[in-house]
Amino acid sequence: MRLIAFAFTAILLTVVAASAQRNVTPAIERDPLLEADALHNLDVAWQAFGPARKAYKQVLGRFEETYAAYPEFSKIDEFLYLAGMSSYYLSKNEGKQKVNLNLEREREKYDPQRLRENAVAYLSMMLERNPESKYRETAEKVLKELKPADQ
């Protein structure tokens, strides 16, 4: 009798353990060096974004560099917010770094329509990845302005 109870318990534990393992979301392995570099870029981007500098081109440069090298960055949602808002402000030619549409490379990269599209993409991605973001209200307000109700 004990042998049957033991066998039944062993089978039950195996089934429970196997089903529990199926529901586990694997943790993302983060490279500590890339994480530190990305964190530094985020810090520099926040400094550039702030009211004293309003260097939105610099923010976009830091974001693009970080996203290309390390899209798994633990704070990529925060970076998406900065990139979205910087694109939005540059599309209105705001900030201290002005866009010179007479230069071909600036015209291609900082075309106002393209910047608006990028702002929508970045802010939408940020909200999709982190719907409870502390930047949600601002992002939704900008998205509402950039995306007409019929879209």
Image (cartoon, rainbow, N blue to C red):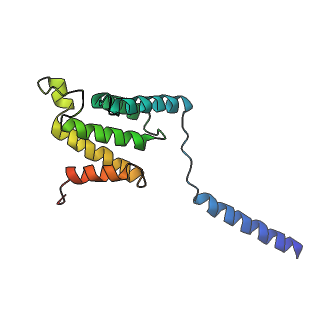
> Is 71 left or right of 121, judged from the image as shown?
right
- Quadrant of image for the N terminus: bottom right
Say above or below: 16 vs 61: below
* Residue at the limit of the structure toward the bottom, as seen here: 1
Q: Give x and y (percent) for residue 129.
A: 41, 50
Residue sitting nearer the eye, 131 or 104:
131
Q: Where is residue 82 in the image (x, y as percent from the top left)?
A: 35, 39
Q: Where is residue 105 in the image (x, y as percent from the top left)?
A: 19, 24
In this rendering, position of residue 66 left or right of residue 57: right
Residue at the front extreme, as displayed = 52
> What is the residue that sits farthest to the left in this orientation?
102
| Number of numbered callouts drawn | 0
Residue located at (46% from left, 31% from top): 38
Task: Name the residue rendered at 56%, 32% in the picture.
Answer: 32
- At horizontal 21% and vertical 34% (from top left) the residue drawn is 94
Q: Nearer the viewer, residue 4 or 123?
A: 123
Quadrant housing the C terminus:
bottom left
- Res. 68 visible in picture: no
Relative image position of residue 93 (x, y in whole percent): 18, 34
Farthest-out residue, right = 2
Please name whichever residue, 83 or 93, is drawn nearer the observer in this view of the structure: 93
Judge from the rendering whether residue 120 lies leftward or rightward of residue 9; answer left or right.
left
* Residue 118 appears in the figure: yes
